[in-house]
Structure formats: structure tokens, C-alpha cells
Image (cartoon, grey):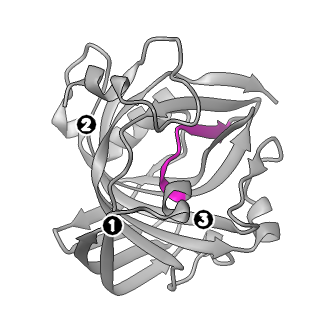
């Protein structure tokens, strides 16, 4: 799909597209979502005070999203697969800032060392390298430094014809907020609505010691998506 066609499809967005020109293109493919209801007071320990935690019917959520990043590139520069394509896991929660609802990353893992270094340098996002392997029915990640492990077997189910209000709340996010020492960085993104499927997870080990009071092996909701094609803008720095 051509990028202009993606940009022209925008009625689903909660606010208008940025006026500036976009800067990056990327694809988030074959994504598996594990969604956990979490204790709000515990979650506050992991989120900067400058961000308001977004709630769904009074409940706070954290999601573990395992997917494959592909074709990531700056505008007008072709993708280079050894750097542009890698497996990724992000652990995210849902926040608000400046009347925009978005996500905040507690952690991001990438399966290629150089890709992680470049992505962290350009974006200020908390990328770190983990050993990640996947197949059509299996996903495995191990981080020896942090003692983290995510491993699961899955079968893709039927596409969900009518997404629920919660489905949309968890997936349709068009802003990202991340902190640095002196700023909250805001990133705008755009893509077509996520198409999601049911997924049967036959085994799951989700072990993140840093987030032991947030995550366990029993997600409250799980989804699969073939993925989305994403257009992204540069960071807007908001002074703390």
C-alpha cells in the first residue's frame, strides 16, 4: 500500500494528522498482544509523574506486544534489511498528555544489536538487545542481563469482525510519550485501524523480574494481528 493512501485514510483518528511532514516509515508485523489488568498504584511507580495514566472503565492496563519490525527507514531513504528488520517486544501502558491518549513504554527489546543501538540513538526510546527467535507458531526471547524471558506457543484464530470498545482502546493509539532526563518526548504516528484475530496460546512464560508486580502468566486478554504499516513523525520535546 502506498504511503499516501495510508495518510488519506484518517477518519478513525481521534485528532487530525500533524501539519509537519512525516519522517519515518515502518511495519509492525505478525503481532501477538498480551494484555494485563494491573494495580494502579503499582503502575504509578513505573510512569513519570508528568503523564496521566489512562484508564478503561476505571482499570489500568499493561500490554506485552511481540512482533516483527520490518522496513523501518527514514523518509526518502530505502530500507536496509540487516538493520531495518528485527524482532521486537515492547511492554507498554496507556497514558494521556496534552489532551492526547497514547502509550508509554516500560521496556523495548530488539533482536539485533546494531538495530537497537541505532533506534535508541535516534528516538531516545528504551531499546535493549535480547536474543529473540520466532517461527509461525513460536516466539522466544531471553535477556541475560535483566534475567527476562518471554516464551510462548500459539495458534492464530479467526479474525474478529467487530472489535469491542476495549479492543479499540488497547490498539488504536496514535501518540507515544517517553521521558528523558529533562523532557517528555511526544511522537505522533499514523496507520490504518488494526485488524485483530483471536489467538490460542498453548504455553506461556512471561518472566520480567522488574515488573513482577505487574505481569504474570495469566493475561486478561490476548490478540493477534497480521500487522500495520506505520508513518511516524519526529519527536516533540516537552520540558519537564
- Assess whether mark 1 and mark 2 are in contact (beta carbons under 8 angstroms): no
Q: Label 2's element?
A: helix
**Mark 3 against mark 2, which lies toward the viewer?**
3
- Assess whether mark 2 and mark 3 are in contact (beta carbons under 8 angstroms): no
Residue at x-position 42% and y-position 38%? 117
Q: Which residue is mark 1?
A: 160
**Quarter placement of the N terminus:** top left
On the image, the x and y values in percent for residue 224 come to 32, 66
Camera sees residue 45: no
Report the magenta residues as a range.
Answer: 170-179
Residue at x-position 38% and y-position 37%? 191
Residue at x-position 51% and y-position 22%? 17
Observer-nearest residue: 22 or 19? 19
Residue neighbourhood size for the residue with mark 2, other residues' Cα within 10 Å, grouped as few (<14), some (14–19), many (≥20): some
Observer-nearest residue: 42 or 110? 42
Lateral position of residue 206 relative to residue 158, left or right: right
Lateral position of residue 205 relative to residue 152, left or right: right
**Mark 1 against mark 3, which lies toward the viewer?**
1
- Give whichever of discs 2 and 1 has the lower sequence position: 2
Observer-nearest residue: 27 or 118? 27
Lateral position of residue 178 relative to residue 163, left or right: right
Q: Which residue is mark 3?
A: 62
**Mark 2 against mark 1, which lies toward the viewer?**
1
> Residue 83: which disc?
2
> Residue 215: which disc?
none
Residue at x-position 72% and y-position 69%? 59
Q: Is residue 177 covered in magenta?
A: yes
Amino acid at each position: 500500500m502506498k504511503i499516501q493512501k495510508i495518510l488519506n485514510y484518517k477518519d478513525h483518528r481521534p485528532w487530525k494528522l500533524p501539519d509537519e511532514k512525516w519522517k519515518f516509515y515502518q511495519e509492525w508485523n505478525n503481532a501477538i498482544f498480551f494484555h494485563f489488568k494491573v494495580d494502579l498504584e503499582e503502575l504509578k511507580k513505573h510512569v513519570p509523574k508528568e503523564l496521566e495514566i489512562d484508564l478503561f472503565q476505571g482499570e489500568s492496563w499493561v500490554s506485552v506486544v511481540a512482533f516483527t519490525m520490518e522496513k523501518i527507514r527514514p523518509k526518502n531513504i530505502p530500507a536496509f534489511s540487516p538493520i531495518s528488520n528485527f524482532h521486537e517486544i515492547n511492554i507498554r501502558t496507556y497514558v494521556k498528555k496534552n489532551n492526547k491518549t497514547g502509550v508509554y513504554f516500560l521496556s523495548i527489546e530488539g533482536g539485533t544489536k546494531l538495530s537497537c543501538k541505532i533506534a535508541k540513538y535516534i528516538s531516545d526510546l528504551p531499546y535493549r538487545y535480547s536474543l529473540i527467535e520466532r517461527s509461525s507458531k513460536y516466539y522466544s526471547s531471553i535477556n541475560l542481563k535483566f534475567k527476562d524471558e518471554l516464551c510462548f506457543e500459539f495458534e492464530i484464530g479467526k479474525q474478529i469482525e467487530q472489535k469491542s470498545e476495549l479492543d479499540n482502546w488497547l490498539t488504536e493509539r496514535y501518540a507515544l510519550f517517553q521521558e528523558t532526563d529533562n523532557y517528555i518526548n511526544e511522537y505522533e504516528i499514523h496507520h490504518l485501524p488494526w485488524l485483530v484475530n483471536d489467538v490460542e496460546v498453548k504455553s506461556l512464560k512471561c518472566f520480567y523480574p522488574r515488573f513482577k508486580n505487574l505481569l504474570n502468566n495469566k493475561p486478561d486478554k490476548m490478540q493477534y494481528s497480521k500487522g500495520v504499516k506505520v508513518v511516524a513523525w519526529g519527536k516533540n520535546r516537552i520540558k519537564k
